[in-house]
Amino acid sequence: MSGLNLLVISEIIKSLVQYTLSVTLFKQWYDAKSRFLTDIQLQFSIVMFTIASGEVFDVMMDSGIVEKVLFLYKIRGFILAFGFTTLMFLTSYVWLYGRKILQVFVTCSYFYFFNYSIWNSETIGEVLRWIAIMIGILALPVLISFIIWKMRLIPSVSKPLLILGTGILITS
């Protein structure tokens, strides 16, 4: 079996696992007695769904179903921007609790700059570089939140969910 086939197969498996996690987390959120848009299950569900959808683009391009063109990388980046913006929303909700205007500003700014950077890129390499930069910008506050939680200063968050969220950023 060639290396390309193994790559495509691994991307398909990865995408299926991510979709499964997304549906599982969404179901946990939906079945809860009370649901809020800030619930970590919903936020991680959205992030996992968008990452899995980005993987579908990778599968189609790596298998030759569609050509690797700049426009498709920009669409893939837009999908990822939506997902990671939900994680920025969750992070800003934790860090800026009670400051709704600032939460909205930070979240919208992140989404705007993520998309502005992608749509103004002139090469596939630039798109990929901006995606990595924007995920990196988000990784720092999420990592700090994880460390604070680990020190038991944020006790109410489920350990498996927080580890999953940190894992999402690391594997993206």
Image (tube, rainbow, N blue to C red):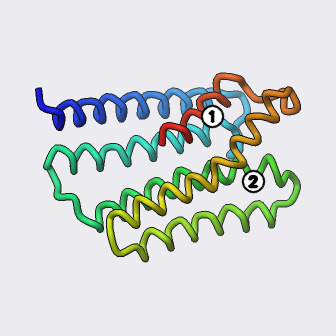
| Viewer-proximal residue among 98 and 77 | 77
Secondary structure beneath label 1: helix
Toward which corner of the image does residue 156 lie, by quadrant? top right
The disc labelled 1 sits on which kind of residue? Gln
| Image side of residue 45 versus residue 162, left or right | left
How far across and down, in percent of the image, does residue 82 sit?
52, 56
Q: Residue 74, labelled with which disc?
A: none
Above or below, 167 relative to 65: above
Q: Which residue appears at 67% of the width and 61% of the height?
A: 107
Res 79 → quadrant: bottom left
Q: Position of residue 12 (x, y in %)?
A: 28, 33
Q: Is the residue 66 above or below the residue 18 in the image?
A: below
* x, y percent for residue 20: 43, 28
Which residue is located at x 42 percent, y 73 percent? 119
Residue at x 51%, y 58% (from the top left corner): 81
The amino acid type of the residue labelled 2 equals Ser
> Residue 4 in the image: x percent, y percent?
17, 37
Give the quadrant of the N terminus. top left
- Residue 141 as seen in the image, left or right of residue 96: left
Q: 24 and 65: which one is in front?
A: 65
Tag 1 residue: 41
Name the residue at 23% across, 64% down: 69
- Looking at the picture, tell me which residue is in the foreground, 42 or 44: 44
Q: Secondary structure at mark 2?
A: helix
> Crowding near pointer 1: few (<14 within 10 Å), some, many (20+)?
many
Give whichever of 54, 24 is nearer the camera.
54
In the image, 65: left or right of 116?
A: left
* Residue carrying label 2: 92
N-terminal-most mark, 1 or 2:
1
Question: Pointer 2: residues within 10 angstroms few (<14), some, or many (20+)?
Answer: many
Query: Between tags 1 and 2, which lies in front?
Result: 2
Task: Measure how far apart labels 1 and 2 are at the Cα level.
Answer: 16 Å
